[in-house]
């Protein structure tokens, strides 16, 4: 009788271990998948930051004398211009190897004087700052 109880106790411990293995396996699989997804998104953002090659050229105190230059091989999507805490939502694409004055990006910022102001341009997820 003692031999049979040790066999049953071993079977019960084995069944408990196997029944816990499935939920743990599912948990760690979902954890791995979410980490892999986050890593892929982070890599895509880093790749976008690295591919964006833009210079801001400040030649004066008005929006038509501040130029944005794309010296890279990929187009730059400009989505936001911030001037003195005022947000201007824009939709402008600066092609590769092109230069454009800040006044061309939006008609709302054509006639703004940029004396003692901070201009921030959001392009492809990057922020570029010009101090006038």
Image (cartoon, grey):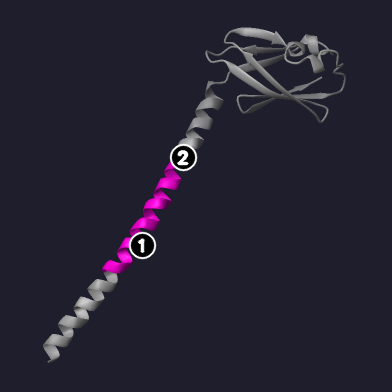
Report x, y in % for residue 5.
Answer: 17, 87
The relative height of residue 84 versus residue 6 in the rendered view (above or below) is above
What residue is disc 2 on?
39
The relative height of residue 92 versus residue 127 in the rendered view (above or below) is above
The magenta stretch spans which residues?
A: 18-39
Q: Secondary structure at mark 2?
A: helix
Asked whether, in this view, residue 2 is left or right of residue 52, the answer is left
In the image, what residue occupies the spot 82% across and 11% down?
60
Mark found first going from the N terminus, 2 or 1: 1
In the image, what residue occupies the spot 55% across and 14% down?
72
Answer with the quarter of the image where residue 75 lies: top right
Q: Quadrant of the N terminus?
A: bottom left
Q: Quadrant of the C terminus?
A: top right
The crowd level at tag 1 (other Cα within 10 Å; few <14, some 14-19, many 20+) is few
Asked whether 132 or 119 is in front, the reply is: 119
Q: Nearer the viewer, mark 2 or mark 1?
A: 1
Q: Is residue 68 one of those drawn in magenta? A: no
Report x, y in % for residue 87.
Answer: 78, 28
- Estimate the spatial distance between the alpha carbons at disc 2 and disc 1, rounded to whole Å: 24 Å
Report x, y in % for residue 70.
Answer: 61, 13
Asked whether 55 or 15 is in front, the reply is: 15
Report the disc number at residue 23. 1
In the image, what residue occupies the spot 32% across and 67% down?
20
Asked whether, in this view, residue 87 is left or right of residue 34, the answer is right
Q: Secondary structure at mark 1?
A: helix
Answer with the quarter of the image where residue 13 lies: bottom left
* Residue 106 in sight in this render: yes
Report x, y in % for residue 61.
Answer: 84, 13
Report the disc number at residue 15. none
Dominant SS of magenta comes to helix
* Residue 59 in sight in this render: no
């Amino acid at each position: 009788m003692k031999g049979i109880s040790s066999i049953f106790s071993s079977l019960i411990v084995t069944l408990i271990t196997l029944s816990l293995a499935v939920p743990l396996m599912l948990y760690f699989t979902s954890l791995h998948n979410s980490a892999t997804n986050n890593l892929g998104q982070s890599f895509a953002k880093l790749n976008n930051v690295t591919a964006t090659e833009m210079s801001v050229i400040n030649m004066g105190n008005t929006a038509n004398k501040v130029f944005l230059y794309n010296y890279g091989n990929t187009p730059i999507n400009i989505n936001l211009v911030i001037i003195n805490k005022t947000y201007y939502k824009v939709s402008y694409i600066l092609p590769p190897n092109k230069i454009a004055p800040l006044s061309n990006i939006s008609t709302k910022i054509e006639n703004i004087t940029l004396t003692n102001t901070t201009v921030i341009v959001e392009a492809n997820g990057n922020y570029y700052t010009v101090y006038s």
